[in-house]
Amino acid sequence: MRIRVRIFGEISEEIGKNYDFEIHGKITVLEVLEKVSSISGQKRGYLGNYKIGEKDIGYLVNGKNIEFLDGLATILHDDNELVILQPTTGG
Amino acid sequence: MKGWNGCFLRIDLSNKKVIKQNYSEEFAHKWLGGRGFAIKLLWDELTPGTDPLGPDNMLMFLTGPYSGLVIPNSGKLVVAAKSPITGGYGDGNLGSMAGPNLRKAGYDAIIITGKLDKPSYILIENEKVEIILANELWGLDCYETEKILKKSHGVSTGVLSIGQSGENLTRFATIISQEGRAGGRPGMGAVMGSKKLKAIVIHGTKEPLLADKEALLKLGKEGFDSIQKRDNYNFWKKQGTMATVEWCQNASTLPTRNFSEGIFECSKEIDGNTMEKQTIKQRGCPNCNMICGNIILDTNGEESELDYENVVMLGSNIGVGDLKKVATLNRICDMLGLDTISAGSSIGFAMECSEKKLIDSDLYFGDFMGAQRLLREMAEMKGEGALFGLGVKAASEKIGKGSSDFAIHVKGLECSAYDCHLCPGMALSFGTSPIGAHHKDAWVISWEISSGTREEYGPSKADKVIEFQRIRGGMYESLVACRFPWIELGFENEWFPKYIEAATGVKYSLDDMWILGDRIYALIRAFWVREYGGKWDRKMDYPPIRWFKEPLKKGPLTGKHLDLSKYDLLLEEYYKKRGWNNLGIPTNDTMKKLGLEKESIELNKILENVK
């Protein structure tokens, strides 16, 4: 199955903006984030300065925050889009 | 006095009388500057019930203890008065050479009362203060006005002016400087227009006396260097506030078609990435090395300075999905002196009224030509603009037919660009903002969404709103310092007491700053209650009714909306933490603890009329 990852904001300059994964079998949000961290050469368990799992960055699956799903254990399905949304600037 | 000049410039326009008034160190220490000075002066000197557009209203331009010095982000100026759009406390800030020039002229604030017989402008050159006839400027836009005045008085002067909207008393007219630096959303431009005051030109050449100039220069340099070394500095420089368009679209908080939805199908056409490709130059405030104004060319090939708020309110909120068109609307606002947030909200409201056939109009969402026409009519207060230039609250009261259900405001001031169908913390921030719905004080939305607590109404939301209100609404607005270094780049708050001490010699801790913030909030709230008397109601702290009554109909948050009973409990929690009663009014104990004993006696008299 195909999973797309899109990254917004300043961390996208560090870890990239887009990833496409072909996955066989079941995969969770956490596992995909660890893949992105690893591929982009980040410190294990981190995306830029953000530690995966800490409540300072938003993760959306098809636009829905994982807080409304099963958190990092949310299982992804074919053609799902995972968005990584760091706190924004602007206000 | 060190740091502060210790002098107000008072100008009575009716009698053409100018007084240079020294004020006490005690006053300076207790209220610091900017918003702190403004509310204390309004409380002490403005007669309750004063017509905001009458001669007795006080129009004030205020600086802080180190404004204009070579310290990061110190080039701002607060403008304050009783607001003609809310009837309560009103203020705003803008970055302009007017602030540094005012300080160098030897004054910490200008306090203007009265009304001129004929349109005029004020020229301040150090001790010299003149009121000069400006018949030839009346009717001109802000760009033309500033150009002419700078030609007469020099390019290094600071110029503050109003456009046609201020002259014609559009209730959300602002004051403009340097082609697009705008301040005073709650109608400060209309207050200036009501006094027939077209502009203020300021040129100063003196230096304020400082407690430790050497230390201040060293700290200033360290601060600039520290900002430049921050991780996200380069990203900020590319998009400034505009990165938020994409973020809000993803979070379903992008105001769309009069705040009916949180996602916009053309968001990519107006976002920061699109802007980056079109940016021709950047513009910022004096003494700033993280400039936020990005300039692109509009549909007419003219320059327009964009940021998140104006792009969203004149873009997705009115259904316009083309950045150049948005830039055109934005430039018209800046030239005419219209607040872009309230203008965008009023146009969106008018479009919805038209589509629902509540008014006889051909406006529709996405109507670029219609939006341009309505902006000009609002600035002239003619045609449809005579109605919508009053602001959405007053317009909905005149239209009736249920239109108040989608008039997006708090206390009469239109909401800035965050849809809160599912952001109770940000809704509380809008609800309790001291000027009506504005994000300047407690911009908690980024925290609220990133912390994964969007559906929670717990006490942590009230704590966060108060924390932000103390920092941003209390400390920064009184120092007259920009909030961006802290909120955007993590520039530590600990820098600010050091700056104050080097400038003034007075030691403040951060805890002192939070008490100052609470003191200012309590007195601003008391001011609102004094103005509204028996009409004061805790419902005035509610966010727009649409977010409770109409769920989102599109996107991943379809069906979501705020819960009124839960919001009311959150509001109660907020009041308790502030030491306010269940009507949202500071208690006697709270007033005393904050050093407002005298003010609490007057408040008590007013409370006899408040149920």
Image: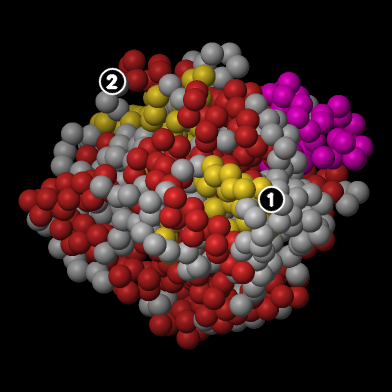
Which mark's residue is nearer the viewer, 2 or 1? Answer: 1
Amino acid carrying mark 1 in the image: Met
Residue linked to disc 1 = A1
Q: Is residue A3 shown to the viewer in this render?
A: yes
Residue at screen point 65% across, 26% down: B322
Per the image, the residue denoted by label 2 is B154
Tag 1 subunit:
A
Q: For numbered disc 2, what is the local secondary structure? A: loop
Task: Count the labels in the image.
Answer: 2
Q: In terms of image quadrants, where is residue B470?
A: bottom left
Instruction: For label 2, count other residues whose C-alpha is less than 10 Å away and answer few (under 14), some (14-19) or many (20+).
Output: few
- Name the residue at the left extreme: B214
Closer-to-camera residue (B542/B122): B542
Q: Which residues are magenta?
A: B345-373
Is residue B198 on the magenta stretch?
no
Please name the residue shown 59% across and 48% down the image. A21
Type of amino acid under label 2: Gly
Q: Which mark is residue B365?
A: none
Depicted B141 relative to depicted A67: above or below: above
User: Of B389 and B121, which appears nearest the observer?
Assistant: B389
- Secondary structure beneath label 1: loop
**Residue placed most toward the observer, A56 or B104:** A56
Give the quarter of the figure containing the N terminus of chain B.
bottom left
Q: Quadrant of the C terminus of chain B?
A: bottom right
Mark 1: few/some/many CA within 10 Å (<14, 14-19, 20+): some
Residue B429 in the image: x percent, y percent? 58, 62
Do badges 2 and 1 share one subunit?
no
**Vertically, is B167 above or below B312?**
above
Residue B91 is situated, as x and y percent measured from the top left of the image, at: 49, 50
